Amino acid sequence: QVQLVESGGGLVQAGGSLRLSCAASGRAFSRYTLGWFRRAPGKEREFVAAISWSGGSTYYADSVKARFTISRDNDKSTVYLQMNSLKPEDTAVYYCAAVQKPGGIWTERDYDYWGQGTQVTVSS
């Protein structure tokens, strides 16, 4: 079992930055690929970024490439999402998730554990 708790969301102006954190508790954190997803109002949840067990491989949705950076600290059992150059269309609830599979772009249904989400609102 893995429990995930996100933090760091908030209100920011377009062009600004936020860093989301996701703290994990439970066993074998370093064995999980970790991902960030988001759900915008009226839309389905979508993949944002993922990072492999070791942190050596990262994966991004085209919409956030070059603006967002995912990283992890296995010693702290925490995964981060640094979001720069934020746009109003990045407004969403952001979720972190964990899956015990090799690094890659796994679908929402593949992920085993989910956090409760943190709201990010970008004003224009």
Image (cartoon, helix red, strand yellow):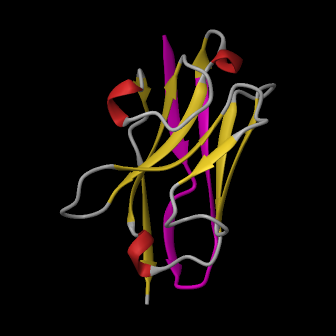
Q: Residue furthest bottom?
A: 124
The answer to which of 92 and 105 lies nearer the viewer is 105
- Residue 15 is inside the magenta segment: yes
Q: Position of residue 54 (x, y in %)?
A: 77, 27
Q: Position of residue 45 (x, y in %)?
A: 31, 49
Q: Quadrant of the C terminus?
A: bottom left
Residue 58, position in %: x, y? Answer: 68, 44
Q: Is residue 43 magenta?
A: no
The residue drawn where x is 43% and y is 34% is 115
In the shown orientation, is residue 31 left or right of residue 73? left
Left or right for 94, reference 64: left
Q: Residue at 58% of width from left, 33% of height from top?
A: 34
Q: Compare residues 32 and 25 and report the one nearer the observer.
A: 32
Span of residues in magenta:
1-24
Q: Residue at x 57, y 55 (%)?
A: 8
| Residue 55 to residue 45: above or below | above
Q: Quadrant of residue 17?
A: bottom right
Farthest-out residue, left: 42
- Secondary structure mainly formed by the magenta segment: strand
29 vs 43, left or right, is right
Q: Residue at x 61, y 64 (%)?
A: 65
Number of callouts: 0
